[in-house]
Image (cartoon, helix red, strand yellow):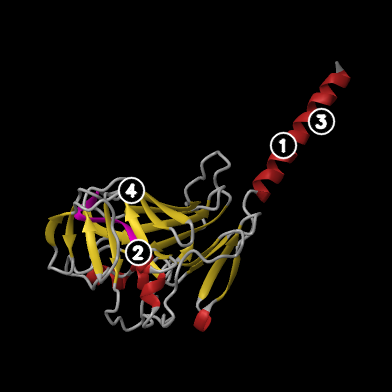
């Protein structure tokens, strides 16, 4: 019995050691370094060489690369990395107001704040889907309360899935004593071969607000969205999955969203945008997960959760 007891104890110790090592190596350490103009950024890589970069200024993803090192997002060639100017490109966070739909500055203010690494994030699910990640947090400041009088915590987890997909999980907690409402969007600049050569599928027969016509409501009866001029629409009550088909690059970008019922599709075409290069519009399309028409309400002590998952799959 003694030998069996010792053997059982050794097995227990071995299993414990394996579990500890697995936990320690589950996430490859991220790199905290200086980016453009000395702004701090986080670089995260998985064990297959896929990566993303996120700036603490704005909590803004600025890069997402596949295992071949190919960039899947676009940064403006004239992006200005000088606070308080927002960064043009990557994935800006538009919160707590989308565009000029309320009294705040356009697109809110969190993209112009310095976020922190979250030292006490929500627990990760007990599966292997999370390969490499970082958790950020932004808490409302006294200056924020002067323009938007609601105390909040915005937690953002950015991580890579097992297939190299990029997932942004947003959690907005009401730390105040009264409810608040917000509108928002996550605004990815997806890299494409040429804006005139791609199409966006999954939004046919839906109502949309045309932002080039004072948000007048129309219904889109086209089978697919193509681009021949400036395009700026808020599609309402959309499916969870939207596809960007790029035949020239033989790829499809799948945009999956949860917790945000609307979607914004935008490309400025040749319209002059101060911090966007003259030809930059050809290289990207934005398909945003959004909540615009019906603001999200969060009661005191409660939390809203939203997910934006982006993946690239082959297409003919």
Give the side of residue 50 with respect to residue 268, left or right: right
Q: Position of residue 312 (x, y in %)?
A: 48, 54
N-terminal-most mark, 2 or 4: 2
Q: CA distance from mark 3 to mark 1?
A: 10 Å
For mark 2, give the secondary structure.
strand
Q: CA distance from mark 2 to mark 4?
A: 27 Å
Report the residue at 46% width, 62% height from top.
Answer: 248
- Residue contact between numbered discs 3 and 4, judged by CB atoms under 8 Å: no
For mark 3, give the secondary structure.
helix
The main secondary structure of the magenta stretch is strand
Above or below: residue 276 compared with residue 17? below
Give the side of residue 119 with respect to residue 202, left or right: right
Residue that label 4 marks:
303
Picture quarter with the N terminus: top right
Q: Position of residue 70 (x, y in %)?
A: 56, 65
Q: Quadrant of residue 230?
A: bottom left
Q: Residues within 10 Å of mark 1 (few under 14, many from 20)?
A: few
Q: Position of residue 163 (x, y in %)?
A: 55, 49
Q: Residues within 10 Å of mark 3 (few under 14, many from 20)?
A: few
- Residue contact between numbered discs 2 and 4, judged by CB atoms under 8 Å: no
Report the residue at 29% width, 79% height from top.
Answer: 270
Residue that label 1 marks:
16
N-terminal-most mark, 3 or 4: 3
Report the residue at 67% width, 49% height from top.
Answer: 24
- Residue contact between numbered discs 1 and 4, judged by CB atoms under 8 Å: no
Q: Which residues are magenta?
A: 287-298
Q: Nearer the viewer, residue 100 or 72?
A: 72
Q: Residues within 10 Å of mark 4 (few under 14, many from 20)?
A: some
- Residue contact between numbered discs 3 and 1, judged by CB atoms under 8 Å: no
Residue that label 2 marks:
286
Q: Nearer the viewer, residue 118 or 307?
A: 307
Residue that label 3 marks:
10
């Amino acid at each position: 019995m003694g030998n069996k007891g010792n053997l059982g104890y050794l097995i227990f110790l071995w299993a414990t050691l394996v579990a500890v090592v697995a936990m320690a190596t589950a996430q490859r350490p991220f790199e905290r370094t200086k980016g453009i103009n000395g702004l701090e950024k986080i670089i995260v890589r998985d064990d297959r060489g896929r990566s993303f970069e996120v700036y603490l200024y704005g909590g803004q993803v600025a890069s997402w690369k596949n295992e071949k090192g190919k960039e899947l997002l676009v940064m403006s060639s004239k992006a200005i990395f000088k606070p308080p100017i927002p960064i043009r490109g990557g994935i800006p966070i538009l919160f707590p107001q989308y565009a000029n739909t309320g009294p705040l500055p356009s697109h809110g203010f969190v993209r112009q704040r310095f976020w922190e690494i979250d030292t006490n994030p929500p627990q990760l699910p007990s599966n292997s889907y999370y390969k490499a990640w970082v958790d950020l947090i932004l808490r409302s400041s006294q200056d924020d309360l002067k323009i938007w009088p609601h105390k909040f915590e915005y937690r953002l987890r950015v991580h890579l899935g097992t297939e190299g997909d990029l997932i942004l999980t947003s959690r907005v907690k009401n730390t105040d004593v009264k409810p608040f409402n917000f509108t928002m969007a996550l605004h990815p600049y997806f890299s494409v071969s040429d804006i005139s050569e791609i199409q966006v599928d999954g939004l046919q027969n839906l109502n949309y607000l045309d932002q080039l016509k004072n948000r007048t409501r129309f219904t889109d009866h086209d089978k697919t969205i193509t681009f021949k001029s400036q395009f700026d629409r808020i599609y309402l009550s959309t499916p969870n999955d939207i596809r960007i088909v790029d035949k020239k690059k033989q790829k499809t970008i799948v945009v999956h969203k949860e917790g945000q019922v609307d979607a914004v599709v935008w490309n400025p075409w040749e319209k002059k945008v101060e911090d966007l290069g003259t030809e930059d519009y050809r290289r990207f399309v934005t398909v945003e997960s959004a909540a615009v028409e019906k603001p999200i309400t969060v009661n005191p002590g409660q939390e809203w959760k939203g997910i934006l998952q982006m993946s690239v799959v082959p297409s003919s």
